[in-house]
Image: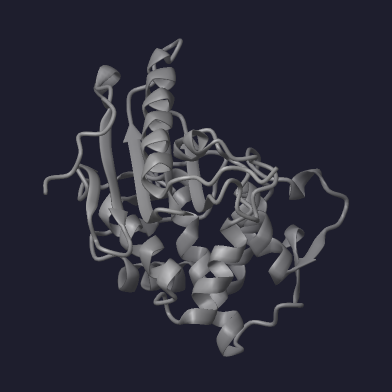
Amino acid sequence: MPPAPGPSLPSTSGARWSVAMVGTRDGAVLVEHGPDLLLPSASVAKVFLLVEVAARLVDGRLDPALLLDRRAVAPVADSGLWRHLATDALPVLDLAVLVGSVSDNLATNVLLDAVGLEAVRARAATLAPGGSTLHDRVRDERGAGDPALLGEACARDLVDLFAGLGAGRVVGPQVSALVLHWVAANTDHSQVSRGLLLDPLAHDVPDHGVSVWSKTGTDAGVRAEAGLARGPRGSVAFAALCAWEPGVDDAARGEVLGAMAGLGTLLRGAVGTRPARR
């Protein structure tokens, strides 16, 4: 059976899409559009850092209580909470939670400093045959000698990764469970997850029978989300990435986010819902 067409994906401002939704129990393709197209992924690629950190915690190379100091790296702005907090040092486990929940840029760079960017790239190479990876640390400005992108990804790689996390196959069951625990707290429901109609600040338990674990990414002219959703009807791994040329008023942004919400509505229908208890 061919995949469903899904909602219309706008192509204004040269928008390019990589989208896939796959049932994890039967492998049925629900939606597919350019699944092998590598696009800028913004912070979605931080999931490869989380896998590497989890692997080192499980095999003992990294102490979960080890305090890491933000003063060891250059300050960085945008997404995150740590730069607003008073404490300069936090344990590894807390930093992973910050990355998974609010995509904290400062926590990302501190963890990268601890495990090494090359190790994260090597981990990505084993998990993403289509070339999805984290290219660099987060920077406020990218110079001529810096990688052009924080990361890039294609939908097929990300769907396979999240399906593997859900099945406990990414490195092993303990590593998979840790990564899912961290991204379960993701507060960004502005993209595909928006269509699931969950509370973005409190969805660590099923709501109407629906649960989601996801990682999002946002940059100028980039929106991306990949994850796993479960409900009464089944489990679906999903990924949607879009890159476009932002204009002065960036009208394309609304069209892209609307299309992503439409994908989320389709996702909600695929996993099903359960009536609330009275």
Furthest toward the top, the residue is 249
Viewer can see residue 81: yes
Picture coordinates of residue 58, whole percent (x, y)? 58, 84
**The C terminus lies in which quarter of the figure?**
top right
Q: Residue at x 40, y 72 (%)?
A: 123
| Residue 109 figure quarter | bottom right
Picture coordinates of residue 146, whole percent (x, y)? 42, 49
| Residue 54 figure quarter | bottom right
Picture coordinates of residue 247, whole percent (x, y)? 39, 14
Viewer can see residue 146: no
Furthest toward the front, the residue is 278
Q: Residue at x 27, y 27 (%)?
A: 9
Furthest toward the right, the residue is 86
Q: Nearer the viewer, residue 85 or 201?
A: 201
Picture coordinates of residue 81, whole percent (x, y)? 74, 46
Q: Nearer the viewer, residue 208 or 9?
A: 208
| Residue 57 figure quarter | bottom right
Q: Nearer the viewer, residue 275 or 21?
A: 275
Furthest toward the bottom, the residue is 60
| Lateral position of residue 193 relative to residue 90, left or right | left
Residue 5, compared with residue 35, is above or below; it is above
| Lateral position of residue 204 relative to residue 30, left or right | right
| Lateral position of residue 241 relative to residue 101, left or right | left
Q: Residue at x 49, y 70 (%)?
A: 51
